[in-house]
Image (cartoon, rainbow, N blue to C red):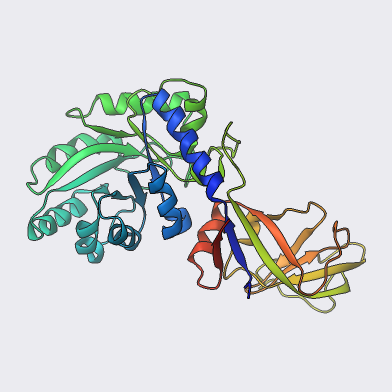
């Protein structure tokens, strides 16, 4: 029996995005690493990545890296969220490279790497204005010199992240800043991890990215868009994913609430304006399982009215097809929706 809500993913579309990323990045002499946190490192999708030639992944959770390496021990895996002190033993055990921004974390990794009889490779992230993780530029040289004296860690390279928090875009001025910063570091490195899906528009134009050797790609891989403005990338598929949810109630109802209203709700429905009777459908998914603000009905005549923890209310008055109890309604989705859908145990994931 088919169970909803359901997340569908298209194997062929994902493969096309992998092949296209390979083509454009190889033209620029760049490596790209598949960021798997967006789909919770779902193993059937990992299998598609590996069968399509991906040999290096990155994730924010050591648990995901552990899961993948248990199935595919030869794949390289980077931990791109700074580990807490309590996570360090597991992080060292499973991650080939770990992002750090401070001596304190690097020193703890050094101690654990010694205990595990290994050399732990590090990526030191620099602050480039987005105000998330990153050592301040004026402190970078001092930190990197100190790390070179730790015997059981090795700085494989430096990296930076923009767009994801502060929304800073990697325009020409920002990339010139990156080039200037890395040229003044104490030595050369094998890896310059100079960005994510937000720099791909530059790659697609065939323009050079100085002092960038590799990119961390998640959103473009999964949705076929660059991350700064959400622009579609040519030859990439934007339809890898589709959400389906089942209708559990359909009724003609007024479009405004009746009675005194509080503001302590997930989503405020219409409170003012001309009252109209509209045909409303309720589907069996809400904020617990998806970021509702990051999905859009495929039928443009269906509108999202609001949501709570377990329901989403739709206006289906003008829907292209007759909507009734048991109907299945399909949605396009964005990155934030995929994050929550693949984390939820209540969503069926199915390849097509």
Residue at 88% x, 73% y is: 253
The one of 159 and 231 positioned closer to us in this rendering: 231
Q: Is residue 95 visible?
A: yes
- Residue 217 percent location from the top left of the image: 43, 41
Q: Quadrant of residue 302?
A: bottom right
> Is residue 227 left or right of 31 when viewed as pictured?
right
Q: Quadrant of residue 351?
A: bottom right
The one of 198 and 101 positioned closer to us in this rendering: 198
- Residue 36 percent location from the top left of the image: 42, 52
Q: Quadrant of the N terminus?
A: bottom right
> Is residue 281 left or right of 189 when viewed as pictured?
right
> Is residue 297 left or right of 220 when viewed as pictured?
right
Q: Is residue 269 visible?
A: no
Q: Is residue 50 above or below residue 243?
A: above
- Residue 334 percent location from the top left of the image: 59, 51
Residue at 86% x, 75% y is: 251
Q: Quadrant of the C terminus?
A: bottom right
- Residue 50 percent location from the top left of the image: 38, 48
Residue at 29% x, 50% y is: 77
Q: Quadrant of residue 250?
A: bottom right
> Is residue 231 left or right of 283 when viewed as pictured?
left
Count the labels in the image: 0
Residue that extends furthest to the bottom in the rendered view of this protein: 259
Residue at 73% x, 53% y is: 298
């Amino acid at each position: 029996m088919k169970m909803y809500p359901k997340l569908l993913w298209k194997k062929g579309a994902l493969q096309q995005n992998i092949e296209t990323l390979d083509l454009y990045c190889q033209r620029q002499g760049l490596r790209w690493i598949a960021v798997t946190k967006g789909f919770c490192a779902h193993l059937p999708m990992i299998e598609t990545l590996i069968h399509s030639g991906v040999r290096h992944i990155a994730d924010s959770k050591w648990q995901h890296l552990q899961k993948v390496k248990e199935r595919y021990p030869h794949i390289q895996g980077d931990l791109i969220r700074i580990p807490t002190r309590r996570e360090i033993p597991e992080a060292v055990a499973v991650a080939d490279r770990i992002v750090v921004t401070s001596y304190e974390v690097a020193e703890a990794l050094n101690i654990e790497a010694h205990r595990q009889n290994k050399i732990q490779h590090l990526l030191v992230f620099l602050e480039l204005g987005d105000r998330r993780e990153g050592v301040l530029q004026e402190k970078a040289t001092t930190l990197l010199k100190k790390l070179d004296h730790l015997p059981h860690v090795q700085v494989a390279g430096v990296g930076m992240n923009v767009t994801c928090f502060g929304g800073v875009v990697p325009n020409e001025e920002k990339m010139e800043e990156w080039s200037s910063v890395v040229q003044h570091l104490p030595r050369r490195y094998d890896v310059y991890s100079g960005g994510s899906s937000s720099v791909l528009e530059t790659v697609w134009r065939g323009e050079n990215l100085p002092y960038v050797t590799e990119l961390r790609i998640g959103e473009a891989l999964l949705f076929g868009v660059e991350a700064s403005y959400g622009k579609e990338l040519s030859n990439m598929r934007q339809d890898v994913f589709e959400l389906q949810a089942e209708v559990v109630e359909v009724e003609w109802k007024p479009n405004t609430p009746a009675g005194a209203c509080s503001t302590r709700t997930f989503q405020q429905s219409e409170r003012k304006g001309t009252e109209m009777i509209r045909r409303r459908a309720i589907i069996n998914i809400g904020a617990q399982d998806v970021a509702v603000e990051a999905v859009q009905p495929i039928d443009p005549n269906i509108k999202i009215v609001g949501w709570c923890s377990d329901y989403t209310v739709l206006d289906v008055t003008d829907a292209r097809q007759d909507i009734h109890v048991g109907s299945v309604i399909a949605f396009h989705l964005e990155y934030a929706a995929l994050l929550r859908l693949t984390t939820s145990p209540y969503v069926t994931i199915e390849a097509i």
